[in-house]
Image (spheres, rainbow, N blue to C red):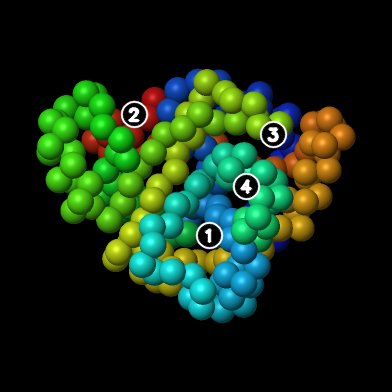
Amino acid sequence: MEVKLKKYKEQLLDWPEKGHHIMAQYDDEKIIVYQSYRKEIGEFAVKNQYFGGAFSLGRMTWIKPNFLWMIYRNGWGTKEGQEYVLAIHLKIDAFKKYLENAVYSSYNDRLGISREEWQNQVKESSARLQWDPDHDPFGGKLERRAIQIGLRNEFTRSFAKDDLILIENISDFVKEQHQFVLNDDLDSLMIPEEKALLFDDEDLNKKLRLK
């Protein structure tokens, strides 16, 4: 596994407790995002190193750079149809492009535009942006917000093949670490090493509400 790991409790000391943060494993070239699928889709992706076969290019696909947010959503890989957990090494320039083009998935006054303008942007955009409460390993809700990005149309097509560097199956790792959580042994819990991501582009940081 090429994902870098670190003890959960050690990372917790450095992580922000609240606010909007893109918690992720990244460097100048790539960022790791996570998705969960049924076995048929996951196996095809790992074997061929792109998304095809039963993967639908016509549906919106959601990516999550925060491991624990993914784990909250898939129940540590126990939810039906989400047993196959993938770590997707994605070109960071592509990830940034998604966010630059993303429209918030729900309307509020902070967007600085009318509801009608927002609705028009949603229709035209191929990327969605959503902030949700982050969660701890037990599924408890946190004050910190976690990001997820929805892709469709040309972004789904580029994500599925051209934007990828590596697709890893981390399902067994997820199962192993889940046992520590079930045994209430967070001292032993290892998860991907993550830190808050900020962009050089201040306008993008402002759009994303990053601190």
Nearest to the observer: residue 106 or residue 12: 106
Q: Compare marks 4 and 3 and give the one earlier in the sequence.
A: 4
Image location of residue 103, percent across then percent down: 27, 43
Residue at the spot of label 4: 74
Residue 159 occupies quadrant? bottom left
Q: Nearer the viewer, mark 4 or mark 1?
A: 4
Is 14 left or right of 20, judged from the image as shown?
right
* Amino acid type, label 3: Pro
Q: Nearer the viewer, mark 2 or mark 4?
A: 4
Spatial separation of the CA atoms under disc 1 and disc 2: 24 Å
Spatial separation of the CA atoms under disc 2 and disc 3: 25 Å
Spatial separation of the CA atoms under disc 3 and disc 1: 23 Å
Residue at the spot of label 3: 137
Q: Nearer the viewer, mark 4 or mark 3?
A: 4
Residue at the spot of label 2: 209
Q: Residues within 10 Å of mark 3 (few under 14, many from 20)?
A: many
* Amino acid type, label 1: His
